[in-house]
Amino acid sequence: MDITALPLYQNFNDINKVDPSYYSRYDIKRGLRNADGTGVVVGVTNISNVHGYLMSDEDKVPDRGRLSYRGYDINDLVSAAVEEERYGFEEVAYLLFSGNLPTADELAQFQRAIDDYRDLPDGFTANYVMRPPTRDLMNAMSRAVLTLYAFDEQAEDRSPKHEVETAIMLMSRLPRIMVLGYHAMRDKFYGDSMIIHHFTEGEKTAQTILSMMRPDRKYTELEARVLDIMLMIHAEHGGGNNSTFTCRTLTSADTDPYSAYAGAIGSLKGARHGGANNRVLGMVADIKDHVANITDEGQVADYLNKIMDKDGYDRTGLVYGMGHAVYTLSDPRAVICHKYAKDLVKNTSYEDDFRLLEIIEALTPQLMAERGRKKAICANVDLYSGTVYATLGIPEPMLTPIFASARIVGWAAHRFEEIVSGRRIMRPAYKKTGASRDYVPMSDR
């Protein structure tokens, strides 16, 4: 008998379908969202603030987007690093971990600690990154994090010292694991040559990624600075985003840090979360296939209308890179990304692609308003990030892993806060539907 003929397989959708009327009948907050799209408040945090709207007489009023880390505006953090011609991701990491900006000496000590952890345990690359290789780097990174548990004799230690050391260690090693996993994947599945570069002591995270990724190890200062900015804006985004909430939920159960961070990586992999940047690139490629001149607003508008009519790209009606759960008038990360990407794409083959993204950002709200959409919509960070990474020569399979390499910092900060201040396992309720049934003996079924 073919097992797939069983109702278990054939009736999968019917078995798992819940009557949608129950959601309104019991006022269920699907996705932990209120009816107006705002999030259900489930906690408080001192780590960051994600601001996208105001509430007036219970109405949601669109507002300019703002993002702050420990009270510092992300624009100020990025601008300071750029103006002072230094790298900012490590400073942001220290800020999120400790609650305060570091002194020069504290930042130097922090960088030395990151350097000290870059090396992986003996045999780790050969036995746990290269074997078995996987076609998905997020799974490879999650697996590697769980495997590192076995190399930590104090893995179940919940002391502040161990928690901070584990966070710094993973912040240091995830970029290496990502690049090594990528080269192992290319060697196994695409016949490319295996490239294994050792890290260079003293290099910042952005420099390390580019140096280890490229065969000749060469990169320009502009490339490294732009990647550093991308790491800064991806480092943290409040406690309510799916992967951070996953990390806090797992932490609330009093699990070990490796399990909590591996779970967060699994969440970020999702196409509705960190994987969205790949969908933007796919949409851009599709527009280029169907629009003769991608810098012509009229031609782009015509095809965007087809996309919204579910007659273009993936037939979902979604314009990827547009819209956000919190931001309404602007996403500060997208604004920063756009600002610093301009110089990067100038005189490259991606200049027209960048112009296309600007057109999509400008036209989509207008076209949606013409269709009767009343809610404000803005570009989110995913609209521009994929093209920035492509211009840097970073392959598509590494886009979400780079996101994870930055967001480990935010996950760790929220785990610390949950350990100290949460102190209660998260246990929301689900309403049971359907009638009770009497047991039926095997002979009567």
Image (tube, rainbow, N blue to C red):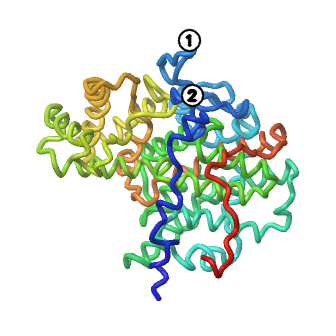
Question: Is residue 411 toward the left or the right of residue 208 in the image?
Answer: right
Disc 2 designates what residue?
Answer: 67
Provide the secondary structure element on which disc 2 rests: strand
Asked if the residues shown at circle 2 and circle 1 are in contact, with their CB atoms under 8 angstroms apart, the answer is no
Q: Nearer the viewer, mark 2 or mark 1?
A: 1
Question: Foreground: 172 or 421?
Answer: 421
From the image, tell me which residue sits under label 1: 56
x and y percentages locating residue 297 in the rendered image: 17, 31
Q: Secondary structure at mark 1?
A: strand
Q: Check the image and name the residue furthest to the top.
A: 57
Foreground: 160 or 310? 310
For residue 50, above or below residue 6 = above
Give the x, y percent position of residue 202.
Answer: 63, 52
Q: Residue at x 59, y 45 (%)?
A: 242
177 to 418, vertically: above or below: below
Q: Residue at x 55, y 76 (%)?
A: 130
Q: What percent of the width, then of the height, locates residue 139?
A: 55, 65
Q: Quadrant of the C terminus?
A: bottom right
Point out the tag, 2 or 1, that comes first from the N-terminus: 1
Quadrant of residue 76 in the image? top right
Q: What's under tag 1, amino acid-wise?
A: Ser
